[in-house]
Image (tube, helix red, strand yellow):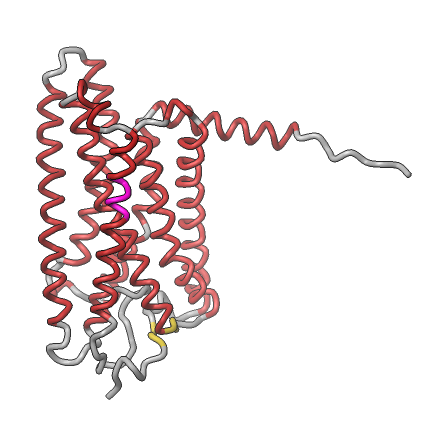
Amino acid sequence: MSNSSSITEFLLLAFADTRELQLLHFWLFLGIYLAALLGNGLIITAIACHHHLHTPMYFFLLNLSLLDLGSISTTVPKAMANSLWGTRAICYTGCAAQVLLFYFLMSAEYSLLTVMAYDRYVAICQPLHYGTLLGSRACVHMAAAAWGSGFLYAVLHTAKTFSIPLCQGNDLDQFFCEIPHILRLSCSDAYLREAGLLVVSVCLAFGCFIFIVVSYVQIFRAVLRIPSEQGRHKAFSTCLPHLAVVSLFISTGMLSYFKPLSMSSPSLDLVVSVLYSVVPPAVNPLIYSMRNQELKGAVRKLMTRCFSEAICCPCPPTYHL
């Protein structure tokens, strides 16, 4: 029997036992990680460098890309390092830091997606009040509230989780430190202290989900009343990417946390966890840039400028003594 005070490290779930498959997982995760870095980095740079994108919608999208970069950087590099070096270990403090950062960034992203639904609701259903309700100060306050609520949520859950005595060893059936898998190592009935907080969190998350659903019901009703087809197309082009990102985020998260126990297995849990923790940050830039002509144009201009500067950059002068 062991307790949390005697545990110095946790053992994460290995992707494979053979060296060849471990290297395959390393290269696969490296490709996904680089794609996420490139896509989100291009969106952040394009929005920051083009003044015509300095609007509430793109301000929130910039924050979403920052959160996506942070969330995928919290889990994937450690998994890549473990696959490359053939190890499973993560130190106790590293596990606590991973839990804190992951839940901070993911909960802040969910709050931000709720704010973005409100932004689209005001833009389409109350366009005359858009500048008043979503001024620069209001946007900063809402983004700060999303980040702050995510940090508070993560601190509470991390403190509760790592104050629970652990009596079932240190083997986590997950490729990163996740609260449900840590609770499985707790002593009998000790997890109930964290379970109460999880119930409150589920209720708050459900409230945000209802807000998003109601907002989009009102949005679609307003869009369908637009007389011109071009106006409807423009409205849908700004709403559908956000709705697709919300659907991907919520569906993969619910599949991970609310699937029946009869379906639970280490391999299935591993696939589902990759779907909700790795895939959305890599796919979100593609979803947002697919139908958004302004964003695609800004990214294209940015890449063209960087490419031309790289080609036309003069060589440094040489000095002859």
Whether residue 302 is situated above or below residue 272 in the rendered picture: above
Q: Quadrant of residue 130?
A: top left
Q: How many numbered discs, if any?
A: 0
Q: Which residues are magenta?
A: 142-147
Q: Is residue 9 left or right of residue 268?
A: right
In the image, residue 72 lies at what x, y percent? 36, 52
Magenta-drawn stretch, dominant element (helix, strand or loop): helix
In the image, residue 74 lies at what x, y percent? 37, 57
Q: Quadrant of residue 317?
A: top right
In the image, residue 151 lies at what x, y percent? 27, 54
Q: Is residue 144 magenta?
A: yes
Q: Quadrant of residue 284?
A: top left
In the foreground, 110 or 311: 110
Q: Is residue 311 magenta?
A: no
In the foreground, 87 or 268: 87
Whether residue 149 is situated above or below residue 46 in the rendered picture: below
Locate the N terminus by quadrant: bottom left
In the foreground, 276 or 143: 143
The residue at 19%/77% (across/down) is 186
The residue at 34%/52% (across/down) is 71
Whether residue 188 is situated above or below residue 161 in the rendered picture: below
The residue at 30%/52% (across/down) is 105
